[in-house]
Amino acid sequence: MDARSLEESIRKDIENAANDQALEEARIKYLGRRGLVTSLLKNIKDAPPAERPKLGATSNRLKKLAESLIEEKLTVLRAAQPASRFYTPPHDATLPAHDGLTGHRHVLSKVFGEIKDIFVGMGYTLASGPQVELEYYNFQALNFPDEHPSRDEQDTFYITDDMLLRTHTSPVQVRYMEEHKPPLKIIAAGRVFRNESIDPSHAAEFHQVEGLYVDTDVALADLKKDVEIFIQQLFGSKTQVRFRPSFFPFTEPSAEVDMTCFVCRGSGCSVCGKTGWIEIMGSGMVHPNVFRAVGYDPDIYSGFAFGMGVDRVAMIKYGIDDIRLFLGNDLRFLSQF
Ligand SMILES: [Zn+2]
């Protein structure tokens, strides 16, 4: 084939290519490893020396021509059929429409909503306070001694010497009592922060609900009654509750509250570690020093306080074994609730 007919053939084949595949075939025909233009270039060395320069120039011109024509044609094909480059799934008009993804409340908001509804039904009102807190409200006013281990920077995220991320929701109690006179009955909820090593049962940020009741003649029996009503409403009326002596700086006496395991009903299983009991909250009678800090006379007023982890309640209620899932933003987890 002489150079002229080869050029005509190149122009015609590329011009007539109707789609990407035909164009690719034309490219292989001329520019492929054994293509016509490629062979021409390869054969130069076999030509008589006098003809080589002309043959070389012609071959290179044809090569560049084919390349630029293919490039142009490719642009034309893409412009004409933009969608043809993408996979188009088979279309079936009889299939039902997708429901789409609908958002819903986060499992922690849901559990907090249940907890809140129970306490509001018992006459508690909602109170709130800042997450960035003064050390005074987080520790000092709550009767934490200066050398208390919780103040250690191992546990607390300090922002400045006297400002920190609150380690519990209890400072809300102090702020509320500073501005209100008894009787008062509040719950406070929110995010709290501790400098913990993260593992399935410890997170550096988690959530608490805290209750406080102050009046004249509030007794330990009142605490037991409210806590029992709450737990039985949340976990079922057959749930039993027990109080174990404990220590918190801001209550005296203090008690950990256990409830019978909702899985085995007290007979012992893997959820409760074979004990039949699950620890659910801390509680106690408000320490006189806390009352003194907010200007209440501890000889006139008494009160109780309790607090629990919302994350922990949700884990118990739904059998979740890793606290990190709550803030992990994994829809496979979140969409289950
Ligand atoms: Zn159990």
Image (tube, rainbow, N blue to C red):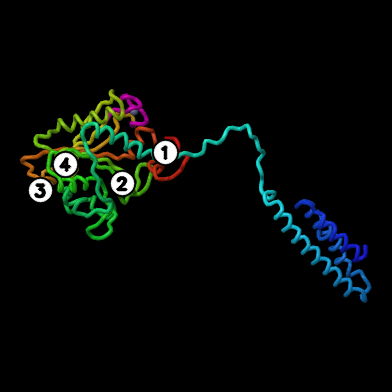
Look at mark 1 in the image and give the residue it sits on.
104
Residue drawn at 16 percent across, 41 percent down: 251
Look at mark 4 in the image and give the residue it sits on.
251
Q: Amino acid at mark 4?
A: Thr
The Cα atoms of the two marked residues, 1 and 3, are separated by: 43 Å
Q: Residue 288, how many percent across, how many down?
A: 10, 44
Among the two numbered marks 2 and 4 on one chain, the one whose residue lies closer to the N terminus: 2
State which region is magenta: 259-272
The Cα atoms of the two marked residues, 2 and 3, are separated by: 27 Å
Name the mark on residue 115. none
Nearer-the-camera pick, 25 or 292: 25
Look at mark 3 in the image and give the residue it sits on.
295
- Residue 273 seen in the figure: yes
The Cα atoms of the two marked residues, 1 and 2, are separated by: 20 Å
Q: Quadrant of residue 259 in the image?
A: top left
Look at mark 2 in the image and give the residue it sits on.
191
Q: Amino acid at mark 1?
A: His
Q: Residue 326, how many percent across, how many down?
A: 39, 42
